[in-house]
Amino acid sequence: MTATTTETPTPTTERLRALIADVREAVGRGLPPDVTAYLVGEKLAPHLGAEHLLTPAQCEPDPAHYRQHVLHAERDGSFSLVALVWLPGQGTAVHDHVSWCVTGVHQGEEHERRYRLLPAEAAGGSARLVATEDVVNPLGSVCGFAPPGDIHRVWNGCDGPAVSLHVYGADISRLGSSVRRVYDLPADA
């Protein structure tokens, strides 16, 4: 799974600083991952689609693959905020994540296919991925998840660019990516 990564060391808009403060408050409660993801989603939703949240540079795509702009990484490593920019047809491989995550669509829409891992003994000797749900996430939609059971692939299936904001419970500036594992198994198309 290839993405171009651009790090933006400090927030560059007032609205982005407000979003980071909102997320910091939710994460700082120290609640379980699923509850934290829910609270972060509530904080993220009002900012989606808002003008002056991101700068033009933070919405720059890459013609070869989707681009990851690291917008903020909390000093204690408790969360990161990332903008993913997708041109039509760009997408990820099937993967899971290192931590809880909340995503929100800021521009365009994202398509997602979610999977369940069927172990070898249950799949007749060879592990495989079974599609469980196809989702189209429109502008303003928010979803969250926590491992395990967070296997999916995401792509831009619309005619124009898509931008999504991702809040991860990990330091993505240090890790480079939120991906824990890429699945190279037989999967439902």
Image: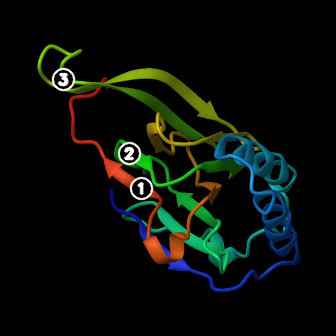
Residue at image position (22%, 41%) is 184
Pointer 2: what residue? 95
Label 2 – label 1 distance at C-alpha: 6 Å
Sequence order check, earlier mark of 2 and 1: 2
Amino acid at pointer 1:
Val
Q: Answer yes or no: do the residues labelled 2 and 1 have beta carbons within 8 Å? A: yes
The picture places residue 112, in percent across and down from the top left corner, at 51, 35
Q: Which colour scheme is used?
A: rainbow
- Give the mark toward the camera: 1 or 3: 3
Pointer 1: what residue? 179
Q: Answer yes or no: do the residues labelled 3 and 2 have beta carbons within 8 Å? A: no
- Nearer-the-camera pick, 107 or 146: 146
Pointer 3: what residue? 120
Q: How crowded is mark 3: few (under 14 residues within 10 Å), some or many (20 or more)?
A: few
Amino acid at pointer 3:
Ala
The picture places residue 42, in percent across and down from the top left corner, at 83, 46
Q: In this view, does 157 lie above or below 91?
A: above
Residue at image position (57%, 28%) is 135
Residue 38 relative to residue 150: left or right = right
Asked where in the image residue 189 lies, by quadrant, the reply is: top left
Residue at image position (56%, 61%) is 85
Sequence order check, earlier mark of 1 and 3: 3
Residue at image position (61%, 65%) is 82
Amino acid at pointer 2:
His
